[in-house]
Amino acid sequence: MARLSYRVDVLCRPIVLGLVVSVVLWLAGAAAAEAKPTQEEFRKALKLDGSVLADADSLQLSYAEAVDSVSDAVVQINSLMRPRIPRQLVPYLDDPRVMRFFPQYDPRRNPGQTGLGSGFVVTSDGYIITNNHVVEGADELEVIFPSREESYPAVIVGRDPNTEVALIKIDAENLPVATLADSSKIRVGDVALAIGSPMGLSGSVTMGIVSALGRDTATLGSARRGSRRSGILGDSGYESFIQTDAAINSGNSGGPLVDGLGRVIGVNTFIFTGGAASGNIGLGFAIPINMVLRVAWDLADDGQVERGYLGIDMVSLTRDIAEMVGLPQPNGVVVRGVAEDSPAERAGLRRSDIILRVDGEVVEDREALRMRIGNMQPGQDTILEVLRGRQIVVVPARIGKSEGDQWVE
């Protein structure tokens, strides 16, 4: 009888232990879920300064204070992508006789591809903004604080290939955070400083000016011909890059572009290079911080970005059409089609309508309207001013949610 009791006890121990472990893991998961910030909590954790950058009264000989104010929050991001091993080879990974014919899949010979980028801390508990292409496909991420010689493993909270924005997280507290400016107030000619880890040279700072604003795929099309580009330039339509001549090179991607007060105005993303050259030639591009924050808020919430959807096919208004309908400037878009059962159809938009303004702001062209609608929250109400025939019509519309291959305009 004693032997039977002993056997029952031995059999029950693993079951009880498994139940205890399961309960502990469940409680840990529940605590982690409760700790996840809401969009409003994420906004409150950011350090914002939207004041206009004023002209200095005298020649400024140093930007050391501006750099000091942000440099502790700038990080280097190292990524590792392991080789994707075919399933047929998995049983033979420990057999050197087989794997010598497949060295590209042998973990001992090919530990994986490494990548280098930059980023900056936006909340004291470890949220970091960077570029999508810096972390895309990474199996491991390491965040290094060059100023403190500390490193942390990181996880991807979310990423958005359409805007090239990514949000990652490290497990740390009381971190230095970057102050974020209002990028709608920057001007061509403002001082711009690029900070990051070009070629692995962490903590590097370069200086230039804001060369242009509102660059997108359409306006950059002619520049792409005959040039090489480093980084990512897609055709998503959600683009309004800051152009700068501050030197940006490989490894700067994801790092901050800051103003003369050390406030982040954009995220360095890609450069154009001339001919066979691979370095900077003064054509760098950064995502405005206002657009970055709109995406980061969504990523912090659930790891995904919700975009507004109107449901029209459209083209930019040309000067010839503007003259034909009596408009002084070719600002606006012409509706070529309305998707069935879309917010546009429900609002009463028609083919050949010309959308001139959204919520009182002039629509410059197709790209501007697409980005404006895409950046709206689903369910948001908006007012469209439309030229229909020769008459201005006010069209209230409720923005929908973009799904897959829907028209997102």
Image: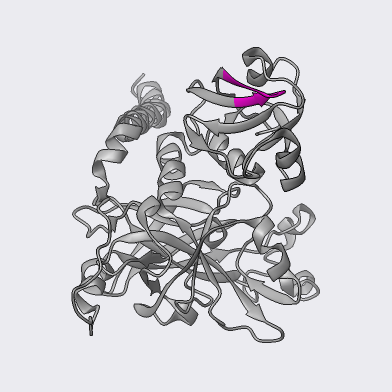
Viewer-proximal residue among 394 and 260: 394
Task: Find residue 152 and report its image quarter.
Answer: bottom left
Q: Is residue 139 visible?
A: no
Residue at position x 27%, y 35% in the image: 41
Q: How many marks?
A: 0
Seen at 41% across and 32% down, the residue is 14
Q: Is residue 374 left or right of residue 154?
A: right
Please state the horizontal and vertical placement of residue 361, each as a whole percent of the image: 48, 36
Identify the magenta region.
Answer: 386-394
Which secondary structure class fits the magenta region best?
A: strand
Q: Is residue 385 left or right of residue 70?
A: right
Magenta span has 388? yes
Image-based side of 342 in relation to 5, left or right? right
Rendered image quadrant of residue 111: bottom right
Residue depicted at x 40% and y 73% = 196
Q: Position of residue 372 (x, y in %)?
A: 54, 38
Report if residue 92 is visible in the image: yes
